Structures are given as C-alpha cells and as structure tokens.
Image (cartoon, rainbow, N blue to C red):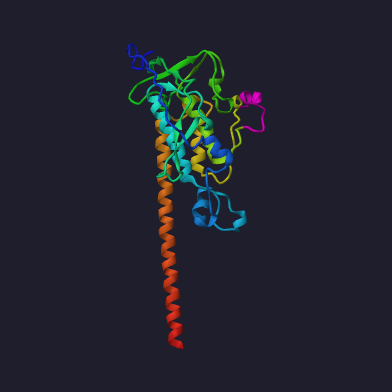
C-alpha cells in the first residue's frame, strides 16, 4: 500500500519496537483514582471557580472539586501528538481508549510518567484518496482529515467494524464503511471525558454494552462534571461531533490544547503574583501597626 500521493509505490513497512512501560496504563490510574489529582480548594479558589464557570465566594462545602488541569492537559496533549504523527502517515489507529495508553515512568514529569499510545493490531492504512473536486461539501471550513500540505481527503473502507464500542464513532460501527482520521478524534474526545470526569467508570455505564451503539448514533454522549473548564469541555464536544467533517484534526487538537494549557499556566502565575503581593501588603500593615503600638507604650 502506498503512503505517498496516488500513483506512488512506497510500501508500508512494519517494525516491532519494544519499550517497557512500567507505570501501568491510563485506565489503571483512572480506576484507582490516583489521576487526575485533586488540588486543595484553598490553593486557587478564585481561579478554579472562574474556570468552572461558577461564582467566586461561598462556603468551602459548596466549592467544586479542583482538578489538576495541568496534568490533564499534558496527558491529552501527548495522546493528540501521537495521533498527529499517525495521521500524518495516513494511519488510523481504530482503538483509542485509556486502556491502550500505556505509561512510562518519568521522574522529571509532574505526573511522574509520560504516555505511550499502544495496540496497533487493528490499525488501517488510509489508502484511498478523494480529490477536492469530488468532495460532496462535507469538508467545508477546512476540517479535512489528511496530512498537512495535501489537498482532498484520505480514507479507507473497512470490511469489518472494529474498536471498543464505548469509544467508536457512529460511522465506524458499520461493516464496509468509509472511515478516516476523524474516527480516532472521536475516540479522543471520549478519552478526554474519561480523564476529567470518568473517575474510572466506563462511558455510558448506565447502558448495557449492546445498547451503546444505537444510543451514540442517536446523539448520546458522556456528560462532564461541573468542575471541568468550559474550554476543555468544548474541545471534547467538538471531537465527538456526529459529523466527521465537523471534528478537528489532530493538528488542531494539539494547537488547542497547547493554547488552553498556556492560558492556565499564565493564570496561575498571575494568581501567585497577586497572592504574594497581598501577603507582602498584609505583612507591611501588620508591621506598621506593631510599630505604632510600640511608640504609644
């Protein structure tokens, strides 16, 4: 099968690379609830409330959980970068889920590990090309799932549906169906929910497995918990759009996650600076008061 433009003859070569992933899988971390971490509410109450869309103030008992969004964004970013690499080579994974995201220990990472995408046994080569003049209009807006720099769209026709039903896009549930890179993006959106709100439960836990396919085709999607920031929720919802052409590409997901992570880190720096200034002002006021009291004595 060729990986270059139509007519090229470069074959796909398969190599087996062994790497020890000694920290388990993302699924195991979620199940044991050791990830994502919950931050103490007093660490950043105003910022947390603003990101969750709530108001500042109120009792601590009513405050939402404060998720370690830096760790969450780093995890999503690594998976999205892996998909960007695959899709640029016209490879479709077809089974993106937390159980297939293995973890390798990394002492320098704030999470203590890094993600490695695994299990390529069901991967497909996107070996068919639809030139732009043959597009039926569903790629409007430039959301085309093909490597940067090419025109048109790469896809494959899968003889048999494959994947994990909780993460499968509607179009990937059929035999002899046309699939492209957007199917992996759909699954990534579900993984984003698993990380931020799943707490170790499978998506659609209220449904029997045989009911999930029809429900997803009908538009059912997981529901995020209130503490998840609105931009993160919106990105996941774009990823699991019913229309494949409405989903972002892996390149776009990487850019969006980097932007959201940078905004969060900037917000935290400002919050720390404001906290330090307030602490300094309070200390100076206390010192002045003590000095005045001493003179009066």
Say whether residue 40 is magenta: no
Q: Position of residue 118 (x, y in %)?
A: 47, 28
In the image, residue 144 sits, relative to residue 286, either above or below, namely above
The residue lying at 51 percent from left, 33 percent from top is: 189
Q: Position of residue 180 (x, y in %)?
A: 46, 21
In the image, residue 7 sits, relative to residue 249, either above or below, namely above
Q: Which residue is the extreme one toward the bottom?
A: 297
Within the image, what quadrant is residue 271 found in? bottom left
Within the image, what quadrant is residue 262 found in? top left
Number of on-image labels: 0
In the image, residue 170 sits, relative to residue 134, either above or below, namely below
- Magenta range: 204-215
Say whether residue 208 is magenta: yes
Q: Position of residue 257 (x, y in %)?
A: 43, 39
Pick the quarter of the image with the N terminus: top left
Within the image, what quadrant is residue 5 found in? top left
The residue lying at 56 percent from left, 17 percent from top is: 174
From the viewer's side, name the closer residue of 99 and 231: 99
Q: Position of residue 65 (x, y in %)?
A: 57, 49
Q: In the rendered image, is residue 224 in sight?
A: no
The residue lying at 62 percent from left, 56 percent from top is: 61
37 horizontally vs 206: left or right: left
The residue lying at 50 percent from left, 48 percent from top is: 51
Q: In the rendered image, is residue 153 in sight?
A: yes
């Amino acid at each position: 099968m060729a990986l270059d433009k139509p007519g090229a003859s470069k074959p796909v070569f398969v190599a087996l690379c062994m790497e020890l992933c000694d920290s388990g899988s993302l699924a195991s971390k979620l199940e044991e609830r050791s990830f994502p971490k919950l931050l103490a509410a007093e660490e950043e109450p105003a910022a947390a409330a603003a990101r969750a869309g709530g108001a500042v103030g109120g009792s601590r008992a009513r405050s939402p959980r404060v998720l370690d969004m830096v760790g969450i964004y780093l995890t999503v970013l690594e998976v999205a970068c892996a998909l960007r690499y695959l899709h640029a080579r016209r490879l479709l994974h077809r089974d993106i889920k937390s159980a297939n995201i293995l973890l390798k220990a990394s002492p320098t990472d704030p999470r203590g590990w890094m993600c490695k995408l695994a299990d390529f046994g069901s991967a497909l080569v996107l070996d068919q090309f639809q030139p732009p003049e043959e597009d039926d209009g569903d790629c409007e807006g430039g959301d085309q799932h093909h490597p940067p720099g090419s025109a048109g769209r790469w896809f494959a026709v899968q003889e048999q549906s494959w994947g994990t039903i909780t993460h499968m896009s509607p179009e990937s549930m059929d035999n002899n169906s046309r699939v492209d890179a957007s199917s992996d993006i759909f699954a990534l959106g579900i993984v984003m929910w698993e990380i931020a709100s799943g707490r170790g439960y499978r998506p659609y836990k209220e449904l029997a497995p045989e009911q999930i396919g029809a429900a997803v085709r009908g538009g059912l999607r997981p529901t995020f918990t209130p503490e998840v920031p609105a931009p993160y929720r919106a990105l996941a919802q774009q990823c699991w759009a019913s229309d494949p052409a409405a989903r972002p590409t892996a390149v776009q997901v990487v850019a969006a996650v980097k932007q959201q992570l940078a905004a969060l880190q900037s917000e935290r720096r400002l919050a720390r600076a404001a906290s330090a200034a307030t602490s300094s002002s309070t200390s100076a006021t206390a010192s002045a008061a003590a000095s005045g009291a001493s003179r009066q004595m």
